[in-house]
Image (cartoon, rainbow, N blue to C red):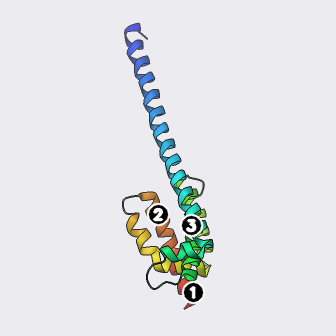
Amino acid sequence: MKTSNAVPIAAASVVAVGVAQLVQRGRQHKQHVDATLSLIQIEWLSRASQDEEEAARWAPEGIEPEQYQRMLSGNRLLCQLSLRWRLGLVSRRQLDLFAGHAMESATCRDYWKQFGSLRVAEAVGDEKSEVFNQALGDAYTRVMNLAS
């Protein structure tokens, strides 16, 4: 290889490696932010699902605080699964399996019935969240069809 060709090729390789590292850092930063925000949400869900006064402050009109606490507990489970999914720790097959198990619980079904459409609406444009919500919705439908 000529020296005149080797220098630009080496420079292009160095640039490519640098760009790949920047992309990887960007992904890792997004995962870190996702995990941090999820942990804050899970902490609040834990507190509100155990503290009736906190649940009473945030319960939607027409939902008793005790019932809302149960729904928040179901949401906490789904948020934990969602975080694992977004971080790539759960395969699609596992997601379907875990969603099915979650929807076997009346707590998760009650939460999904009341707030599932909100989760679906806020996930529009976020492919990972859309897939996650689709798995939950499908699991909910399957469980409800079996019950009827």
Give coordinates of residue 3: x percent, y percent: 41, 8
Residue 131 marker? 2
Residue pictured at 45% horizontal, 27% vertical: 18
Q: State the image coordinates of residue 37 (x, y, percent, origin top left).
A: 51, 54
Residue at the image point whose x is 43% and y is 28% from the top: 16
Depth check: 42 or 54 in front? 54
Return the disc, 2 or 1, that comes first in the chain's sequence.
2
Q: Which residue is mark 1?
A: 146
- Whether residue 11 sits left or right of residue 56 in the image: it is left
Taking the spot 39% from the left edge, 65% from the top edge, the residue there is 122
The answer, for residue 139, to whether it is visible in the render is yes
> What's the distance in space between the residues labelled 2 and 1, CA to CA?
23 Å
Secondary structure at numbered mark 3:
helix
Q: Is residue 4 left or right of residue 46?
A: left
- Residue 146, position in %: x, y? 57, 86
At mark 1, the secondary structure is helix
Name the foreground residue: 97 vs 33: 33
Q: Earlier in the sequence, mark 1 or mark 3?
A: 3
Quadrant of the image for the N terminus?
top left
Q: Which mark is residue 101?
A: none
**Residue placed farthest to the front in the image?**
53
Give the Cα distance between marks 2 and 3: 23 Å
Position of 27 relative to 96 (above/below): above
For label 1, the crowd category at 10 Å Cα-Cα, with few meaning under 14, some 14 to 19 and many 20 or more, is: few
Residue 60 occupies which quadrant of the picture? bottom left
Q: Which dot marks residue 45?
A: 3
Answer left or right for 89 relative to 31: right
Give the residue type that dot 1 points to.
Answer: Leu
Is disc 3 surrounded by few (<14), some (14 to 19) or many (20+) residues within 10 Å?
many
